[in-house]
DNA sequence: ACCTGAACACCGTTCAAGT
DNA sequence: ACCTGAACACCGTTCAAGT
């Protein structure tokens, strides 16, 4: 439950800063990231906006601290299995954490500097590969290939069906329904292959990380395809050196 | 060169809207996306900010139009080869376009609704798979697994080496250099596996799409791993049905 | 020395006044 | 009817005045 644990490196400014970040994470969970401003955050903490600048250099650092606080929630790695099952389990753990903070994946995607918790997590994922027998350069390639999937989310091309009016009142309106059907018909004639693919799967609305992202089954499909590929590469590397 | 071609669906508001989007793309190319506001864009066009709202509903629609204008630059698909080489070539074409507009990948990543050019491009990529023999549901899975890679970029975990001071004046300063070396030493002791992996590869600074993203070699490595996986899945699907 | 509230320089967007 | 400039409701952040 606590936002800061396992992977966190020794922090210099302890008590107040984490309280600010904690409050920011909870605020984003409650009202969405777009509603998190220095001013609204200060309001929820009952302080004047400028007070935040004592614990956080600026808004960018606040956002960085928020993603790192979320990453710190990822449980530690299992140690009693092979690299394959350990990595799979770890990444699905990360996914569970990201699902709990739907704004986090999109924010993480925009960050360029990892925080201490992020570095700790990456370090342990890398360790699982190298102790599993992956040579350094192959581990490097494999981490790049994983990309955002290490964090338990996959950046999709676009959300598969363009979300058809989530407002139930509007959905009940027969005129709106007809307009929607007509829209889909037009889309299907203009982009027949997209329509066929869209029809090929009903998406599970729970288990989606962030807007425009993957559902659980798709994520595991892609993850397993990658891990299988990694296994083959490892086998190749071994036959070449042995 | 023209921003709108191949994949664009019949547009309703033609001349003025594309001129606005064109100007916005060029402005972003020149000064970065962060500097593109309704006000700065209006200034470069020599009009009052409110004039833009005639051609674009709001800023969100402007941004959507900008990514779609970039996507429209992707050349049409080659038709005289198998799905594998065609898809590979097409995606590397997309990558070349994204490289020309470094802000586009990050913006695309935040979008949830594809524009007409995006739908046209996706439709043609999907068509290549299905005419190549992929059943609809497998094509669907494969498209999801590709994720953002259809657009020629891979969302990385974080930029591999935290960029060490790009300012040449600062880099020449021996004190700054020493501080940087000390920082790396600290990082290496706190996160030894990350340090080892970072040392395992020097990154090519050209050919990088957006901040915190992949270089060309890494991208092709991951792409080929996926395409190889897809080939195997296709072979499996065929032996199961034949 | 420290905190804080006003102020600055921006946003995107509304809206009414002027033509 | 149409355009436009002022204005509104926000930002993040600076800075000086008050304690």
Image: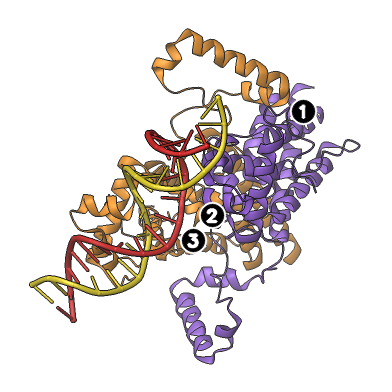
Chain colours: A orange, B purple, C red, D yellow
**Circle 3 sits on which residue?**
A122
- The nearer-to-camera label among 2 and 3 is 3
Q: Residue B117: where, in percent of width, then height?
A: 70, 35
Task: Report the Cα–Cα distance between label 1 and label 3.
Answer: 37 Å
Residues at discs 1 and 2 both on one chain:
no
Q: Is residue B84 above or below residue A170?
A: below
Residue A2 visible in the shown view: no
Name the residue tied to disc 1. Answer: B130
Residue at 43 percent across and 73 percent down: it is: B190
Q: How many marks?
A: 3
The residue under the point 72% across, 55% down is B100
Residues under labels 1 and 2: Cα distance?
35 Å
Q: Position of residue B165 (x, y in %)?
A: 55, 77
> What residue does disc 2 label?
A83
Residue A173 lies left or right of residue B74; in this view the side is: left
Asked where in the image residue D9 lies, by quadrant, the reply is: top left
Using residue A236 as the reference point, say whether residue A21 is left or right of it: left
Residue at 39% across, 57% down = A63
Circle nearer the viewer, 1 or 2 = 1
Q: Chain of mark 3?
A: A
The reply to whether the C-beta atoms of the residues labelled 1 and 2 are less than 8 Å apart is no
- Kindly indicate whether the residues beneath marks 2 and 3 are on one polypeptide chain: yes
């Amino acid at each position: 439950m606590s936002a800061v644990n396992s992977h966190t490196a020794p922090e210099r400014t302890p008590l107040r800063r984490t309280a600010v970040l904690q409050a920011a994470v909870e605020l984003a969970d409650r009202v969405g990231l777009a509603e998190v401003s220095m001013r609204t955050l200060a309001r929820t903490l009952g302080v004047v906006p400028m007070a935040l600048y004592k614990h956080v250099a600026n808004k960018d650092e606040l956002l960085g601290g928020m993603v790192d606080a979320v990453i710190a929630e990822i449980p530690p790695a299992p140690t009693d299995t092979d690299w394959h099952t350990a990595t799979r389990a770890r990444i699905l753990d990360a996914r569970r954490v990201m699902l709990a903070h739907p704004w986090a994946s999109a924010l993480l995607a925009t960050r360029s500097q990892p925080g201490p918790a992020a570095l700790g997590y990456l370090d342990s994922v890398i360790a699982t590969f190298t102790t599993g027998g992956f040579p350094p350069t192959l581990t490097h390639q494999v981490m790049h290939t994983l990309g955002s999937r290490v964090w338990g989310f996959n950046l999709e091309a676009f959300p598969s069906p363009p979300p058809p009016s989530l407002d139930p009142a509007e959905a009940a309106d027969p005129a709106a329904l007809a307009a929607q059907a007509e829209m889909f018909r037009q889309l299907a004639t203009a982009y027949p292959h997209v329509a066929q693919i869209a029809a090929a799967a009903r998406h599970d609305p729970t288990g989606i990380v962030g807007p425009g992202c993957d559902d659980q089954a798709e994520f595991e499909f892609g993850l397993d395809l990658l891990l299988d590929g990694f296994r083959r590469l490892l086998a190749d590397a071994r036959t070449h050196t042995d």
